[in-house]
Image (cartoon, rainbow, N blue to C red):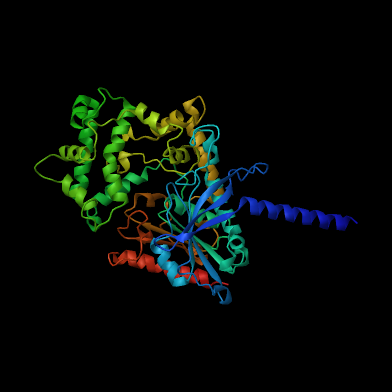
């Protein structure tokens, strides 16, 4: 009798779970295809995966491209492959780039998903601003990863035409891809959900749990000096000299700085000067991080050519370079105005700032001049970042002295969950790719070890490579080093997919 009751209860529970799964995990794809062959749609996911009594949902945007999919894969020895591009801190796109090149070779289904709170995947807030502090508690690494995990787990049922077996059978091999923050997510999906994610490709993924990211600026200066990527020793020296002059003027003649950069404000406090430094230094951070040696308009080579003009001083060249970017009558560097804009409850850019401050996800580019930072240490400190987190998001509560501990606690949680950039505890089948001129490579996996290689965890480093550059489609303009990196990715994926 008890056995029969147990069977009935089990069946009821299964029916309830299936019913909930169908209700919550619905996939909807359009019939029309976008230019590259992908169909756009939405996946209905839970707003709060860790509150079992809350069934509120939201629509997460997805794309599925079956242009190169081998519909006969289930009848073949190695089964089927699905390549999933993880969404990151911005609007997502249909599958593309090198992932689609690889999908074509391996007959894989190519899929993209958009991260919650970005693009068209915003969770509505019936009580007010979509990006209010209270509502942003639904934005976290773990919530986003559960969106992806539920999406993967329900895909074969929701899309029967592809005849995919469940991922835990090993006959459908899901490989996650991503770059930068989404590269971190890609690697972490394999770490967190090895039963459904068979392997991962993580490009330019700074997976170390570090918010005080002082190593970034060291690579900026190294790249500005590197002839391989368009820099020179003269360029590096000019940039250092220009910012030294700016630092001296900010201390001793701020009115001159206000005049030179056509600044709107009459006076500047230290947080205003932080805003100015952020704007001025962005020229160099941007061109190094996304350097393309074939770009004749914006690259390290173009910036360096301007900075080493001999008929003007490095500081004058810096002023001219910066002022050319300002399209307004004057340049506002007011910290209070920045707070008013970035802390508005309907400002979409607030999402990533929140993750940096409260979720242990981001990396603030601080400056340590003794380590090789070319900018101004006084106005790019970790303490200033913490002040912003407190002022904008209330991190640490009423007392700003608690903010650092709160941020570090979020970082610790990520380290406990995912292990930082120490691959010792990782499962198998992970490909890490970095460029040694990418400033975010500082916190990534850049070296191989025997123990890691035995588990098919491999690191590729492109000489002169920039941020996420390996994610671009195969090109005749790829450097020899980049060609070797992309070929390495291909060979290791081939090895992953051949495993039984």
Residue lying farthest to the front in this orientation: 32
Q: Nearer the viewer, residue 483 or 234?
A: 483
Placement of 498 over or under 418, stated as above or below: below
How many marks are shown on the rendered structure? 0
| Residue at figure coordinates x 49%, y 42% from the top left | 360
Is residue 425 visible to us here?
no
Horizontal and vertical percent position of residue 432: 44, 59
Quadrant of the image for the C terminus? bottom right
Horizontal and vertical percent position of residue 421: 47, 52
Horizontal and vertical percent position of residue 359: 50, 41
Quadrant of the image for the N terminus? bottom right
| Residue at figure coordinates x 34%, y 35% from the top left | 380
Residue lying farthest to the right in this orientation: 1
Residue lying farthest to the top in this orientation: 266
Q: Locate residue 219 relative to residue 488 in the image: left or right.
A: left
| Residue at figure coordinates x 22%, y 43% from the top left | 239
Q: Locate residue 484 relative to residue 94 in the image: left or right.
A: left
Residue lying farthest to the bottom in this orientation: 76
Is residue 353 visible to us here?
yes
Placement of 282 over or under 112, stated as above or below: above
Q: For residue 295, what is the image quadrant?
A: bottom left
Horizontal and vertical percent position of residue 63: 48, 57
Q: Nearer the viewer, residue 359 or 347?
A: 347
Q: Nearer the viewer, residue 294 or 451?
A: 294
């Amino acid at each position: 009798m008890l056995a029969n009751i147990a069977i009935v209860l089990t069946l009821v529970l299964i029916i309830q779970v299936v019913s909930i799964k169908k209700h919550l995990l619905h996939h909807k794809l359009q019939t029309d295809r976008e230019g590259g062959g992908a169909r756009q749609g939405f996946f209905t996911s839970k707003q709060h995966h860790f509150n079992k009594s809350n069934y509120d949902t939201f629509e997460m945007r997805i794309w599925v491209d079956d242009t190169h999919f081998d519909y006969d894969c289930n009848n073949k020895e190695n089964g089927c492959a699905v390549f999933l591009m993880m969404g990151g801190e911005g609007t997502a796109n249909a599958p593309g780039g090198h992932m689609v090149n690889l999908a074509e070779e391996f007959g894989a289904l190519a899929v993209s998903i958009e991260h919650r709170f970005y693009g068209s995947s915003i969770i509505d807030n019936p009580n007010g601003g979509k990006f209010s502090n209270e509502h942003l508690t639904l934005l976290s690494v773990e919530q986003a990863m559960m969106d992806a995990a539920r999406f993967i787990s329900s895909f074969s049922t929701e899309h029967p035409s592809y005849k995919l077996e469940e991922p835990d059978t090993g006959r459908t091999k899901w490989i996650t891809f991503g770059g930068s923050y989404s590269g971190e997510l890609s690697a972490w999906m394999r770490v967190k959900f090895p039963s459904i994610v068979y392997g991962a490709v993580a490009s330019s993924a700074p997976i170390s749990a570090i918010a005080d990211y002082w190593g970034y600026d060291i690579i900026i200066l190294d790249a500005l000096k590197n002839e391989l990527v368009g820099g020179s020793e003269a360029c590096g020296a000019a940039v250092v000299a220009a910012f030294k002059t700016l630092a001296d003027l900010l201390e001793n003649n701020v009115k001159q700085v206000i005049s030179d950069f056509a600044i709107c404000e009459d006076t500047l406090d230290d947080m205003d000067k932080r805003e100015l430094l952020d704007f001025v230094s962005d020229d160099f951070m941007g061109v190094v991080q996304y350097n393309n040696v074939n770009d004749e308009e914006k690259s390290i080579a173009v910036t360096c050519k301007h900075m080493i003009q001999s008929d003007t001083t490095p500081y004058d060249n810096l002023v001219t370079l910066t002022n050319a970017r300002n399209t307004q009558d004057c340049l506002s560097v007011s910290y209070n105005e920045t707070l008013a804009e970035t802390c508005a409850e309907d400002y979409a850019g607030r999402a990533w700032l929140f993750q940096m401050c409260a979720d242990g996800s981001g990396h603030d580019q601080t400056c340590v001049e003794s380590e090789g930072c070319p900018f101004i240490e006084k106005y790019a400190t970790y303490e200033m970042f913490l002040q912003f987190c407190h002022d904008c998001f209330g991190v640490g509560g009423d007392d700003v002295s608690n903010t650092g501990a709160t941020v570090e606690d979020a970082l610790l949680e990520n380290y406990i969950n995912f292990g930082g950039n120490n691959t010792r505890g990782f499962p198998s089948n992970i490909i890490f790719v970095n460029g040694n001129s990418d400033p975010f490579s500082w916190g990534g996996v850049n070296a191989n070890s025997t123990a890691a290689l035995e588990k098919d965890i491999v690191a590729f480093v492109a000489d002169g490579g920039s941020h996420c550059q390996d994610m671009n489609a195969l090109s005749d303009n790829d450097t020899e080093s980049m060609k070797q990196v992309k070929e390495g990715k291909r060979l290791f994926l081939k090895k992953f997919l051949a495993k039984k």
